[in-house]
Every structure is written in structure tokens, then in C-alpha cells.
Image: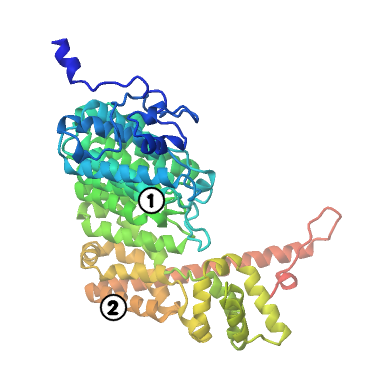
Amino acid sequence: MLRQIWSKLPRKSSKTDSAECARHESPITQQRSNGSTAGLGKSSSGPKRTSVVFPASVVAGIEPLVPFKDVPNAEKMNLFVSKVSLCCVTFDFSDPSKNTLEKDVKRQTLLELVDFVASGSMRFSEPAILAMCRMCAVNLFRVLPPYYRSNSSSAGENDDNDDPMFDPAWPHLQIVYDLLLRFINSTCLDAKVAKKYIDHSFILRLLDLFDTEDPRERDCLKTILHRSYGKFMVHRPFIRKSLSNIFYRFVFETEKHNGIAELLEIFGSIISGFALPLKEEHKIFLWRVLIPLHKPKSVGVYFQQLSYCVIQFIEKEPRLASVVIKGILKYWPITNSQKEVMFLGELEEILEAISMMEFQKVMVPLFWRIGCCINSFHFQFFLCLLCSVMYKSLKGIIRMVAATMCIGSKAKLCASEVEIPSSEDLVLEYKIVSGALPFFLKKNRALIIAMLLVDPLEILLTWTLFNVAERALFLWNNDQIVNLIAHNRLVILPIIFPALEKNAHNHWNPGVLNLSLNIRRMFSEMDDALYLACLDQLKEDEEKLTLLAEQRKEAWQRLEYAASLKPMTENTAVLVTPLTTSIAC
């Protein structure tokens, strides 16, 4: 019996375990020149390198450069192991002229392996699985250079000059990723055997690679991790826990990670497969991970994936809608108008799926916040400074700014077409604008150059961020939200009415003004008595505020008069009247 078992195992070569993953130039060239069947193992030049994750494996003594079609089926798996072990040799891809022949041989070998795995001709043996996982670990698992992390999009701003850093070995790594994906997807792979080698350590190293700046690599990792989650059910809790730890570290410690969007996309598909009722573990993930992910400044990078995950939870269990809305209100970005617009869009999606009972739990704080958004006057900081510049000099300033932004061969052409202002005041105004806005000028080069052909007066009238107020008012275009408001108008209209009236009388933008008037008319048609009652209450409140302001002013005047009657001494505070300290703004 033992003889039969031993006869089925691949014959071992005595000189192939020692240096099958050595980093040197000679092995592949030596194999091609003398046709040795163990050329990779016999070479001893260069340092030995083994995987951190997997131990050294034994390679069958078979020529790795032989095509699969030239060997019998009984030897194909041994040839597979031999070819995979050959690919453990790594090269320096930063120098394209170095080891070109060896790199090409390895690339062709990897492509052969991809075709063999895709064919699904035979089941993978345990030594083949071990060799495959070990080869992927040697080629893929690496420490990312420091500049990968230093340029992370922690501020949520896309700088035109900060291009992602691409690994020069990507054309080679892409084939390895493709091979690993096909290997995991293969029906010839026994998950019960493979789970011993695609273990927790392997998964953690995969997750570490998500911090790369190369979006192509993150996309490959996303697909591989998703397929691994579906293939190895025993690893699912560990994968979810590891993802949670990455999110915790990102939100509460570093706020720096390049792969949050991809990881959330993976989790979105995981959430869609959750069984009902939801486990407490999943609800905790929603409250402790997904809701706090609204806080970082870089939320715009991954907001679409985050919103999808949140909506998936609500569709699974609608009772979580009120919990989510409370969490969003907790992290509401009061001073960031762009984030406010994104949050309003997410709220609209939630309100479309919320039940009446859950809506009534949060409608008071929700519409108080919406009322604040309706009165938002946020607009571009750049416009604030440009408005202070005279119209006659604005076009000259824009042309000068555009000239400073031109680069390369177009610089002289652009500079020659610029109308340089001769007035000293105009030059001073230009210095004020350009000096106060270095970051804006740096990040909006194309936009400024495009403004060359735009009339400056049109810029003043249209280039604004009244999106917050406009986006909040657009909620009334949704029939589901209007239905919720109509059923609870006795509570909502008194909250929202002062904001609508303020916009109707004071807002400078015609679009926001018209939307406010339309919504006010909608409430009047919905319940005219309630509308008139809110209007009377608003007038009464304004009268009270006016009376309180007058009383406060009179109290201060009495205090000032009383202080002016007292003689001044050395240690007595001097009363300074508002008249002597007023500064014109």
C-alpha cells in the first residue's frame, strides 16, 4: 500500500530545493544554452530568497521550458509545478535594459500558465497549490515605497501635479494577478485543500497591497479578494474583520489610504448577500464603520461606494434608516459645502426607502438641518476676492493669471497674447488675488485658462456654489419625499417656514429664489390655514426678536451712561464707546 502511494508522488530532485527563488541573472540563460533539466536549481550564484509566507517547496525534476502540449497528461502537473517555480525568480524592472532575455522567458512562462489554468484540464494537486501560492507571494507581496503613502489622498483633493506612482513592473505583475484570479476561479481547485495555503496570512498580505497608488493594481486586488471571499467560506469572518480594522485605522488614526473605495465596493457586494434578519455583527459594522466613514475630508473619493453600502443595509432592514440619518446628522459638514451637497444626495436616497414610522423618529432634527441648508450662502472663495476687483481690471487679471499657468512650449505664445495692465493699481490687485489663492491657482490651471474667452461679468454672475441651497430645495421634486412631508406637515412646515421666507425675501440668486417661492406656494395649496398660521407666528417671532434687540440696546446704553459718570482712577477700566472704535468694512 505504501509503495503505491509513494509511486504516485512526483520524483524529487536533490538539487532543486536550495535556490529555486534566487535573484540572479544566469539560471534561465543557462537552461536555454545547455538544456539542463535542473539548471534553475544547480545555479548557486546570487543570494537565496524564500517567501515570508510559504516554506521552500520541492520541484519535480522536469524541464520547465517544455510546452504543456509536448508532455503526457500524467506529467502535466509536474511540469506546472516546475514552471511555477521557475517564475519565483524576480527581476529589477526599474532598468528596462537589464535581464531582457530572462524577463521575456518568465513572461512567456506566465502566459503559458495562464492558458493552462484557464483550460481546466485537470485538478490541481496539493504541491501545485503550494507552489502557486508561493510564487504569487514572491512576486506580489512587497513593501510599498514610502512615497506611495505620503501622496495618499488624505485631503480629498485631486492635485493635477500629484499623479499616482506606477510600479515599473506592472506589465509583469498584471499577468501574475490574472493567473492568481484564474487559479482561484478554477473549478479544478479544491477549496478544502487550497484554504491551507490561501490562509489568513496570505489574505492580510493581499489587503496590505490595497494601499498602492496604482488604480489598475487595486482593481485586480478587488476582484481577487471578492472571488476569494466567495470561494473560501471559512475565511469570510476573518476577511470582514480585517476590512473593519482597515476602516477603523483610516477613520480614527491616519485618514490615509488609497484603497478605501475598492474595499467599500467589495463590502457592498458582501452586504447584498447577508441573510435576514441581520446579525448584530453586521449592525455594529454599520454604526461603527460606515457611519464614521462620512467624517474624513477625503470622503468624496469613496462617497459613491459608501452610499451604496448604506443603502444596501437599509434595503435589507428598513428599520435602520432612522439610525443612519441620525449618524449622518452627527457628522454633518457644516463648513464644507461640497460635502453638504453629497450628504443631501444620500439623504434623498434614504428618504425614498424609509417607512413612515422611521421617518417620524427623525423628521424634526432632519428638517431643522435642511432648513439651515436652504439658507446657505456658500459660494467659491475665489469669487469673494474677484468681486472686490473692479470690472474694468478683472479681464486683465484673469489673463495674467492664465499666463502664469501656461507650461511647456505654449508659454511664449500665451504670454505674447496677454494684455499686461499698465496701471500700478491693476498690478497690485493682481498680486492680491494671486497671492491669496496659491492653492486655487495650482489646482485649477485648466479652468483659469478656459476663462480667457469668458466674459468676466458672466463669471461674477454664474460662478458660485449656491448648490447647497439649491440641492436642499430639489428634495421637493421627489414625490416620495413630498408625500412624507404632506402627511407630517403640521410638524415640518413650522420648522422649514422661516427658512423659506428668508430666501423668498433676501436670497440673491434667482434660481434659489424661484425654488423657494414654488415650495412656499406648494405648502399654501397643501394647507392654506396652516400656512397662514405659520406666517402669523413668524411675524410674531420677528416682533419679539426686534423688541429684545431694542431692550438689549437700551440696557447697554444705560450701562455706558452709568460708567461715564464714574471718575477714572489708575486701576479702573476705560469705557471705549462704539463711535470711537468703529472701523468701516
Task: Confirm whether residue 472 shows in the render.
Answer: yes
Task: Kindly identify which residue carries mark 2.
Answer: 521
| 405 or 455: nearer the viewer | 405
Where disc 2 sits, the SS reads helix
Q: Nearer the viewer, mark 1 or mark 2?
A: 1
Q: Earlier in the sequence, mark 1 or mark 2?
A: 1
Amino acid identity at mark 2: Arg
Q: Residue at x 43, y 63 (%)?
A: 338
Q: Is residue 234 left or right of residue 161?
A: left
The type of residue carrying mark 1 is Pro
From this viewpoint, is residue 390 visible?
A: no
Quadrant of the snapshot with the N terminus: top left
Which label was assigned to residue 65? Answer: none
Decide: is 137 above or below 344: above
Side (left or right) of 374 relative to 450: left
Give the labeled residue for mark 1.
Answer: 171
Position of residue 363 relative to residue 189, above or below, is below
Can you give x and y, in whole percent of width and height, for residue 148 in the image? 50, 47
Rendered location of residue 233, percent (x, y)? 21, 33
Residue 283 position in % (x across, y down): 28, 40
Q: Secondary structure at mark 1?
A: helix
The picture quadrant where one finds residue 381 is bottom right
Q: Quadrant of the C terminus?
A: bottom right
Q: CA distance from mark 1 to mark 2?
A: 62 Å
Q: Quadrant of residue 57?
A: top left
- Percent from the top left, x then y, of residue 540? 41, 70
